[in-house]
Image (cartoon, rainbow, N blue to C red):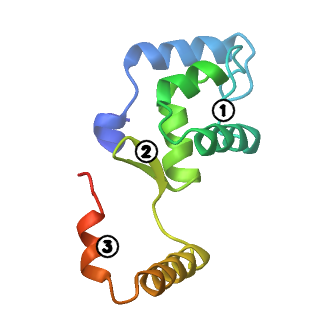
Amino acid sequence: MVSVLQESAPSYTMVKKWARLFQQGRESCEDDNRPGRPVTVVTEENVRKIEKLVLADRRIKLWQIAEDLQISKERVGEIIHEHMNMRKISARWVPKMLTPFDKQRRLQTSKDFLELVGDNIDEICDRIVTVD
């Protein structure tokens, strides 16, 4: 067995255990069901709950969501990053990619701003404060 499986070969102790189990009448090679937590908490319901919390407060922390929903921080992070396609920027959760609707809305907002400013662009830009 070692010559075929090399380092992936089961130990002698494990083979003895399997032999004993099959001699006692076991017929399946599958693992027995175990009690405990479900295999995954990444469900549509949890995704919706997390999305609702994040959209209500984009500065919410992973541990706060995990505490509210009684699931691990790792799973909360997985849901936010993989299922909601969001990431944290400047302590806020933001979508990774803008949708075509978001891009169009930004374009329209910029055009409206330029129209509002008119010829006073230098005066208006001097009043704008940005924070890095």
Classed neighbour count for the residue bearing mark 2: other residues with Cα under 10 Å, few (<14), some (14–19), many (≥20): some
Q: Residue at x 42, y 13 (%)?
A: 13
Q: Which mark is residue 124?
A: 3
Pointer 1: what residue?
A: 41
Pointer 2: what residue?
A: 92
Judge left or right: residue 10 versus residue 109. Answer: left
Q: Marks 3 and 1, how far apart in space? A: 50 Å
Going by the numbered disc 1, the residue's amino acid type is Val
Q: Residue at x 49, y 53 (%)?
A: 86
Contact? badges 2 and 1 (CB < 8 Å): no
Q: Quadrant of the N terminus?
A: top left
Question: As displayed, is residue 7 above or below residue 121?
Answer: above
Q: Residue at x 71, y 37 (%)?
A: 49
Q: Nearer the viewer, mark 2 or mark 3?
A: 3
Residue 14: image x %, image y %?
46, 17
Helix, strand or loop under label 2 = strand
Going by the numbered disc 3, the residue's amino acid type is Ile
